[in-house]
Amino acid sequence: MGRRIIVIGGGASGLIAAARAAELGSDTLIIERMERPARKLAITGKGRCNFTTGHDVAHAIEAFGANGRFLHSAFGRFYSEDIIAILESRGVRVKEERGKRYFPESDKALDVVDALAGAAKDSGARLLSGYRVSRIAVESGCVWGAEAKGAAEEPELFEADAVILATGGMSYPGTGSTGDGYRLARALGHTIVSPVPALAPIDLVGDAHVGLSPLSLKNVSAALESGGEVVIKQFGEMMFTPFGATGLIILDMGKIVAGKKAGERMELVVNFKPAMSPEQVRARLLREFEAAGAGSVRKALETMLPKRAVPVALRLAGVALERKASQVTKEQRDAIQTQLTGMRFEVKGARPIEEAIVTAGGVALAEINPRTMESRIVRGLFVCGELLDIDGPTGGFNLQAAFSTGYLAGESAAAE
């Protein structure tokens, strides 16, 4: 039998790590806090699981920003075509959607979970569920085991030649991501970059968004402004909620909003008609109001906006709902146009880290060898997945990073 390896955490990175280590002949044990593995993976993408991206490695590394270069070796060793091959070999057909986002053809994240859990099991990895690791045992700077405790058991010490830490971050704690990995890594001397929400919805000030809730929008643009300057601008899908806004183009703003300084004013600016020039919007409004004649401006505007958005747009423009379209002045028409092309909402902040899809921050990258995922502080300790201080945008990038770093960790841990 090969090396004894313990994988702490049975999520996306942990299952891949265990499957690879066991495949290479290691005696591999997954210790999972929850009763079932990959609970968080099962709810990603609203239960559909955007598990990877079709963009090439260079684009993906750039998408992760300054820390992206850390992923060169991991992406070079295991990338999108490799995770697709694993899933398809286990009967999970995949499809590519807009933005080069890959999903299971069934639109069921559980199919991905079952495939990865099955791959780990069939490779020979064992799963110990319902156990929480309390400490990683180290002697003379080298890992030799991990202590874990079940619901009604005394703590048990499991010996190992290597430990792979794959516990995830702090988002969606109900799935088991409660920050245990930060505690375990810190206890061994690792630096933890303070965790903050990365892909997170945002809270808005006022009540305009409440009037728009629960309005889902497609093909709109949204910009985040600070001090009158555009920080980020996105095109795609979003949704207004009672607390603020969420959706694909909003989530990518979460990390920026989370870093908002005290007293800094940020605004979310939504353009409902990004495909039209200001001149085209102005001409269209004029045509609709002329056609409506003595009818209400409310009815006229419903030809250009979702019905739920019309009262809000008119209130913000200072125009009465039942005012006759023929009586709308040029100044009022200009005010309405402003709401169509740049409705503004003051940003309060990001939603709590528990509601973030991905956690930013984590184990400092300088303390991990990017070619192996092994700790530079403790021999035999490997760190992978969301626990690392790396995060990317929506679109399958983060799950691919979890799979890639997990695969590399499992392969490296299995090596003599």
Image (cartoon, rainbow, N blue to C red):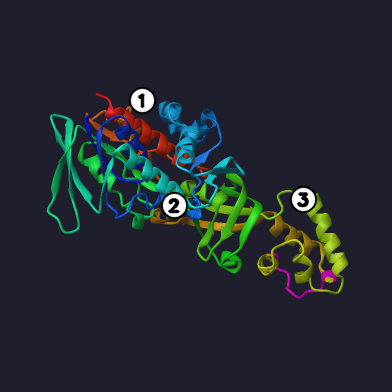
Q: Amino acid at mark 1?
A: Arg
On the image, the x and y values in percent for residue 401 come to 43, 37
Q: Amino acid at mark 2?
A: Leu
- For residue 345, what is the image quadrant? bottom right
Q: Secondary structure at mark 3?
A: helix
Relative to residue 351, is residue 84 depicted above or below?
Answer: above
On the image, the x and y values in percent for residue 354 come to 38, 55
41 in the magenta segment = no
If you read the primary sequence from the N terminus, does the residue marked by circle 3 or circle 2 appear first?
2
Please name which of the two marks, 1 or 3, marks the residue nearer to the observer. 1
- For residue 173, what is the image quadrant? bottom left
Instruction: State the separation of the CA atoms marked 3 and 2.
Output: 45 Å
Residue of label 2? 110
Q: Secondary structure at mark 1?
A: loop
On the image, the x and y values in percent for residue 179 come to 30, 49
Q: Are marks 1 and 2 in contact (CB under 8 Å)?
A: no
Which disc number belongs to residue 300? Answer: none
- What are the residue bounds of the magenta stretch? 317-326
318 in the magenta segment = yes
Instruction: State the separation of the CA atoms marked 1 and 2.
Output: 31 Å
Left or right, residue 168 beside residue 228: left
Please name which of the two marks, 1 or 2, marks the residue nearer to the observer. 2
Q: How many marks?
A: 3
Residue depicted at 38% across the width and 52% down the height? 171
Left or right, residue 364 beside residue 92: left
Which disc number belongs to residue 278? Answer: 3
If you read the primary sequence from the N terminus, does the residue marked by circle 1 or circle 3 appear first?
3
Residue depicted at 27% across the width and 30% down the height? 25
On the image, the x and y values in percent for residue 404 come to 41, 34
Is residue 55 visible in this depiction of the protein? yes
Which disc number belongs to residue 371? Answer: 1
